[in-house]
Amino acid sequence: MNALPTLLAALDDARLDFRTRAALERHQERLAHDHLRWVAVHSPAVAARFRAAGLPLSRWRELPPTDKTGMLATFDTLNTVGVTLERALEVARHADTTRDFTPTLPGPRGPVTVGLSTGTSGTQGVFLVGPDEQARWAGTVLRHLLPGGLRGLTRRHRVAFFLRADSPLYRSVQGGRLGLRFFDLLRPVPDLAHDLSAYRPTLIVGPPSVLRAVQRAGASVQGQRVISVAEVLEPDDAAHLSAWGEVVQVYQATEGLLALPCPHGHLHLNEAHVHFDLEPLDGGEPLGDGLHRPVITDLRRRTQPFIRHRLNDALRLHPDPCPCGQAARRVHSIAGRQDDALHLPGAAGETVTVWPDFLRGALASVPGLNEYHAEQTGPAALTLHLDPHDPATHALALHAVHAALLRTPADPERLTLTTRPLDPPAPGTKRRRVTRTWNPT
């Protein structure tokens, strides 16, 4: 870790503790004014979007959103360090194949870290991070995730990272009293469990499905904190993982560091650095407690700007203020990806939307069910992949899903529900407990 830039970034992040929405929004406007002027000069793709919309930079909130497809289509002129998509993919995929994640690309402001998303939505995303952004990321992460915040740097910590791919970005938090070990998800689970027990970590970071598998394989850990990343943290996983320490979650994607836990363990949008427009998905109020799709503008990232970028996630906001007093909005839950929303028949034969969290909540309550995957395979067909798949779990899972659907606009009587055994996941794949493989064209 380059200690000084990271520490300065952490101290600056600690200063950004806003207690009113007005103060937070004034801060965002100040950042946006300077950030957009710089980006419009250095990113031809962003400048072209403003010209096409006929908008001055001051009306950036009105800019029509882009998405991952648009980002990849304009990648070469979007980033400000002269990296082509072909070259970025070549470096990232070579690292993924060789498991050597140290190479970076040269950039005008220093080495550029290249990363690759898992591609759970069908298209792999690519991210570029410059040295200043890396220091900012590391400082923010240390401040929010170390037990005791920055005071945690006075103690020695051993961090176990369970990730599909290592990265210089993650390594940037290492140094001094903070040690880090990468646990490669492509290795056998029993080996990971053995090595984790021997490492004796104080912090464990990883996808909850992987950490639960390692826990079931016999890993013995007396840690301080478990940090869930990459997947939705569900109550059943949190309850089991709490045996290893306090469980918190981070909401991070290719598009950036989007939400972090507060001292009370509640997830807050990272609004000191990212502006969020929240589009209602279920006919609710724009800032109500229904489901929302985020449109983000990262007010810090210059290497690969994200300006009015629409995500594919569905968030449910918490209606009540957090005891921590932060003005940043509080996330109740991440309901799932929008393309995993189920399109099921309603009472009159119409198609209605059922969000993944309805089914996850139902199946999590089934006694004896270790793991599951609900998959919509047709317009009125839902398959439940169950572990274990025996008469008891078969009957209880069908009953739980049927009862849950009765609380939605869907009509379970018009739906064909089947069960089958759950196949073991391929190593390194991200868990999605509810998916829709049928496309309603």
Image (spheres, helix red, strand yellow):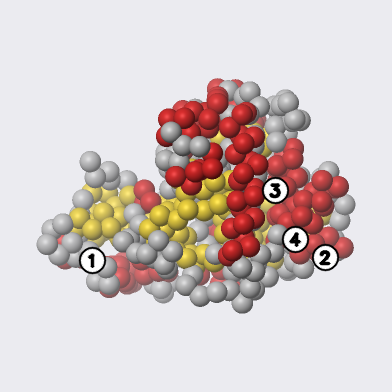
Question: Could you tell me how far apart the alpha carbons at marks 1 and 2 are, in whole angstroms?
Answer: 50 Å
- CA–CA distance between discs 3 and 2? 18 Å
Residue pictured at 50% horizontal, 37% vertical: 56
Identity, as a three-letter code, of the amino acid under mark 1: Pro
Residue 25 vertical placement versus 133 (above, below): below
Q: Secondary structure at mark 3?
A: helix
Q: Which residue is mark 1?
A: 409
Q: Secondary structure at mark 2?
A: helix
Which is more N-terminal, label 2 or label 1? 2
Q: Decide which of tag 4 and tag 2 comes sooner along the chain.
A: 4
- 233 vs 79: above or below: below
- The residue lying at 77 percent from left, 51 percent from top is 9
The residue wearing badge 2 is: 151
Asked whether the viewer can see residue 15, the reply is yes
User: Disc 4 or disc 2, which is closer to the eye?
Assistant: 4
Where residue 7 appears, as percent x and y from the top left, is 82, 52
Instruction: Quickly name the residue at label 4.
Output: 14
Classify mark 4: helix, strand or loop: helix
Label 3 crowd (10 A; few <14 / some 14-19 / many >=20): many
Closest to the observer: 98 or 175? 175
**Viewport quadrant of the C terminus:** top left
Q: CA distance from mark 4 to mark 2?
A: 12 Å
The reply to whether dot 3 and dot 1 touch (C-beta < 8 Å) is no
Residue 137's tag is 3
In the displayed structure, 117 sits above or below 193; it is: above
- At label 3, which amino acid type do we have? Trp
x and y, in percent, of residue 19 in the image: 64, 69
